[in-house]
Image: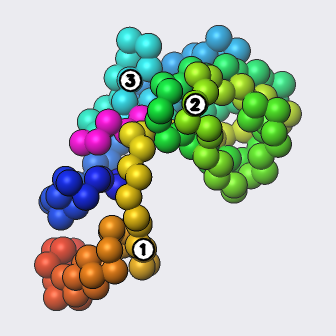
Amino acid sequence: MGQPASESENERAALCGLQQADIPAITLPGGSTLNLVAGEWQDRAGPIESLTGVFMSTLQLSAGAHERLPIAPGRQVFLYVVKGDVEVSGEPVQPHHLIEVDRDGDCLLIEASSDACLLFGHGDVIDEPLYSHGPFVMNTREEIVQAVDDYQNGKFGGLDA
């Protein structure tokens, strides 16, 4: 997950595996399910503690479902449609498409015309340049070159065979 340049992007990475039973499933007012991975929803907390305050969840909607999701103003909000046909605030979004949502809103209106699964997340806005190369995302080209060099020289560790 991206971090501001003022924070170290070279902190030791961590991987956390979860089972479905570890992820809180919250029933929304419209009957859909929000699976809370990171962050807080109402009085519940996801099992992953984000270093950068990221909220991450999946949404399971049945055909005909309508949900109104509150969002904090000023956050970078995104939805990725894994499957199904949905409208977000009246705009159709096709499967396998990612949308970013206006930072000034206070809620999202989601309607599903078929069973749907979405990835829903938000985080602090990081207004900094981004450079990417393969799986590497940094703030400058020089940082990308260093990250690739570190990777090629085994500084990221390895897998035991």
- The reply to whether residue 21 is visible in this rendering is no
Mark found first going from the N terminus, 3 or 2: 3
**Type of residue at label 2?**
Asp
Q: Nearer the viewer, residue 37 or 122?
A: 122
Mark found first going from the N terminus, 2 or 1: 2
**Type of residue at label 1?**
Ser
Check disc 3 and report the residue beneath it. 40
Check disc 2 and report the residue beneath it. 104
Q: Residue 45 in the image: state x and y as whole percent.
A: 34, 23
Q: Nearer the viewer, residue 161 or 59?
A: 59
Mark 1 vs mark 3: in front: 1
Rendered position, 109 above or below 127: above
- Name the residue located 84 percent from the left edge and 25 percent from the top edge: 64
- The reply to whether residue 131 is visible in this rendering is yes
Task: Let me know if residue 53 is in the magenta part.
Answer: yes
Q: Nearer the viewer, residue 97 or 36?
A: 97
Mark 1–mark 3 distance (CA, rounded to whole Å): 30 Å
Chain part drawn in magenta: 51-55
Which quadrant of the structure image shows residue 102? top right
55 with respect to 47 (left or right): right
103 with respect to 111 (left or right): left
Q: Which quadrant would the C terminus be assigned to in this image?
A: bottom left
Q: Residue 11 in the image: state x and y as whole percent.
A: 15, 59
Q: Residue 10 in the image: state x and y as whole percent.
A: 18, 64
